[in-house]
Image (spheres, grey):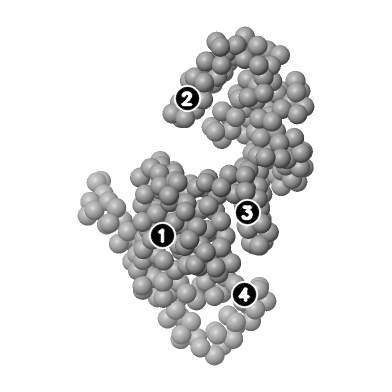
Amino acid sequence: MDELLTPASASSYSAVYQLIAWKRYKEALAETETLLRDDPHNPYPYALYGQIHLLLSDYERAEHWATEALKRDPEHELGWYVRVSVYYETDNEKAFYQALQEAQRIDPYEAHYYFLEANRLNKKGKFKEAKERMGAALELDSENPQYLAMLSYIEALLGEDNESRRLDREAIRYGTEEPSVLLYLAWAAFRRGDYKLQETYMRSAVQFNPDSKQYQDEYLEALRHRYVFYRICLWPNKLLRRMKPWQLIVTWVLSWMLFKPLVIIFLILHVLAHWSTRAIIHVRIFGWRRRRR
């Protein structure tokens, strides 16, 4: 917080951040509105108001209030942080990189910017570049469990399983109760072929964040991976996903022409594995309850 605050306003800001930590976002908004009324020329409450909307996934309002903060101070660090985060969350890649460049000029020591950029690079399959960005993030915040978990995942993507496991142990030392950390570690475990550990991490992640559909889906997927029958049937799919489109077309045409019975058997086995494991998972989570009519 760059602005000089009175003891009363400092107390109000502390109250807002406590409400945010408790995820009582509506109350945090109401408290911030008081700050806006009391000090309308200060950019900080505008940026903070935008940050809360960002946490509520209300990206349009988050961007609006970040812009209001930047009108009052074009180099306000939190205002730029919110703007960069909005563009990242909305997949506005061009705007993201433009904002990121300016944000890093203003605040070169914000480690989270490197984390966000690494995520973008990961989605493009640029794992080595992503690893470099995470190295920069950890130079600034060496004990951040989310950054360590992310790097563990990247190392697994690069086939560096031993280093991935080492980073896994480091991340767990600092973030055993953070769902996002457990999610990245589960992905890393999956890439290393450690399906039991993947399930363990996702089970814990769901327990800490039970209302997230993403975590629920990831947990179900982790459970499926533990069944050998499903993994055997899934292996050809993984192989096919690595092939280029023309290679895929040629392979399927040749397979159908030369090994038609085997192709049919594979399709049957894959469908059977999919539905049987879903049934097993349903029983494991919900028990043998019948749907009431």
Q: Which disc is residue 198 wearing?
A: 1
- Give the mark toward the camera: 4 or 2: 2
Residue at (62, 27) in percent of width and height: 50
Residue 8 pos. (x, y %): 55, 10
Q: Which residue is mark 2?
A: 18
Q: Position of residue 218 (x, y in %)?
A: 44, 54
Mark sitting earlier along the chain (3/1): 3
Q: Note whether 255 is above or below 138 in the view shown.
A: below
In the image: residue 291, left or right of residue 133:
left
Residue at which label 3 appears: 135
In the rendering, at what x and y percent does residue 65 appear?
Answer: 67, 25
The amino acid sitting under disc 4 is: Met
Name the residue rendered at 55%, 69% in the picture.
159
Q: What is the distance, in whole Å, between disc 4 and disc 2 at their CAs? A: 50 Å
Q: Quadrant of residue 255?
A: bottom right
Residue 90: give x, y in percent of width and height. Answer: 64, 42
| Amino acid residing under circle 1 | Gln
Q: CA distance from mark 3 to mark 4?
A: 31 Å
| Circle 2 or circle 3, nearest the eye | 3
Please give the residue where the numbered disc 4 appears in the rendered image. Answer: 243
Q: Secondary structure at mark 1?
A: helix
Q: Give the secondary structure at mark 2.
A: helix
Which-is-in-front pick, marks 2 and 1? 2
The one of 2 and 190 positioned closer to us in this rendering: 2
**Amino acid type shown at disc 2:** Gln
